[in-house]
Image (spheres, grey):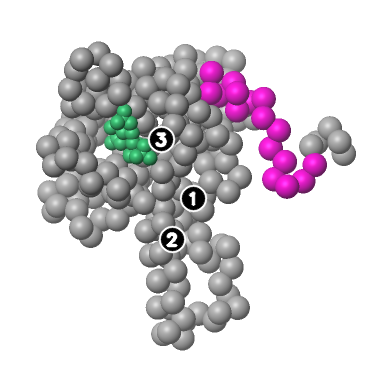
């Protein structure tokens, strides 16, 4: 997946397979509304600019040799926003898929959707499924779109599925281990995020990848998402590169 020679050729000092480059990076794209209101614009305009930032960041993740980029685009709690804003966010997703899908496909990007699908409007659901189907065989970067996603709901669903298997006699209680739980999450098969970036100065996860973030590194920036650009991403990657990931052990130098 990281073996795209063209991508690596212009990757600069933060080349793929370097320990400074996270294999899996996840973004909590926050601050669109505040970006807009501080400029006297509507929140809608903030979301529109947020989409532009997303396009730039996806491209830049590719040039930096990142294997998997996960984006938090709509949470299960975001339904509580005013209806016109929710409607606009849905239309933006529709536009993103319709307008950008062919380019993402050309870039060999594989799209995967995580989040609760059953309650989505059929049109949106079909769009998301088509995006996954079209790009399924691609071998470049994985773009994981967290849409209608909530980590507690995801974990609850996993517990339910395990209980159903247990009740059907297909699973023993002794077989319930961390891997068995991970395998029932929407992210099954994906490595945990190495780095989680949140923009807008908020210092919380907001129900994002709670299980998967057990040993993730975090990077918080005051920048609002529409202002998060290539240089800002490089800064986050540099910060990541200087971390000592001990996973409960001791630092390599201390051995
Ligand atoms: C992030 O920006 C986009 C979504 C949550 C969909 P916000 O809309 O949360 O912007 P703020 O946090 O209100 O500024
Ligand atoms: C998190 O941002 C969700 C997304 C970025 C999609 P929110 O703006 O919804 O989070 P809170 O409400 O500040 O925690
Ligand atoms: Mg927000």
At 12% from the left and 37% from the top, the residue drawn is: 84
What segment carries the magenta color? 235-250
> How many residues crowd mark 3 within 10 Å: few (<14), some (14–19), many (20+)?
many
In this rendered view, identify the residue nearer to me: 209 or 185.
209
Mark 1 or mark 3, which is nearer the start of the sequence?
3
**Residue at 71% across, 33% down:** 244
Report if residue 9 is visible in the image. no
Residue linked to disc 1: 210
Residue 166: mark: none
Q: Residue at x 40, y 78 (%)?
A: 164
Residue 182, position in %: x, y?
Answer: 50, 59
Is the shortest distance between ligand 2 and the CB of mark 3 under 8 Å?
Answer: yes
Q: Secondary structure at mark 3?
A: strand
Image: 137 above or below 18: below
Ligand 2 location (quadrant): top left
C-alpha distance separating marks 2 and 3: 19 Å
Residue 75 visible in the snapshot: yes
């Amino acid at each position: 997946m990281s073996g795209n020679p063209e991508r690596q050729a212009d990757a600069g000092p933060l080349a793929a397979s370097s320990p400074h480059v996270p294999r899996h990076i996840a973004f909590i794209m926050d601050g669109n509304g505040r970006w807009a209101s501080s400029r006297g614009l509507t929140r809608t305009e903030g979301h529109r600019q947020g989409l532009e930032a997303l396009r730039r960041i996806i491209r830049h993740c590719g040039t930096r040799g990142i294997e998997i980029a996960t984006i938090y685009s709509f949470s299960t709690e975001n339904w509580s926003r005013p209806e016109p804003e929710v409607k606009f966010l849905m239309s933006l997703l529709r536009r993103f898929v319709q307008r950008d899908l062919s380019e993402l496909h050309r870039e060999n990007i594989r799209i995967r959707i995580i989040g609760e699908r059953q309650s989505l409007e059929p049109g949106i659901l079909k769009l998301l499924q088509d995006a996954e189907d079209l790009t399924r065989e691609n071998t470049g970067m994985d773009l994981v779109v967290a849409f209608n996603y909530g980590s507690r709901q995801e974990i609850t669903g996993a517990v339910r599925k395990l209980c159903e298997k247990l009740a059907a006699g297909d699973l023993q209680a002794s077989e319930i281990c961390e891997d068995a739980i991970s395998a029932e999450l929407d992210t099954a098969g994906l490595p945990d995020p190495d780095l989680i970036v949140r923009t807008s100065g908020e210092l919380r996860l907001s129900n994002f990848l709670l299980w998967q973030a057990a040993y993730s590194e975090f990077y918080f920036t005051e920048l609002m998402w529409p202002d998060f650009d290539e240089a800002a991403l490089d800064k986050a990657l540099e910060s990541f590169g200087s971390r000592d990931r001990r996973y409960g052990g001791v630092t390599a130098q201390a051995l």
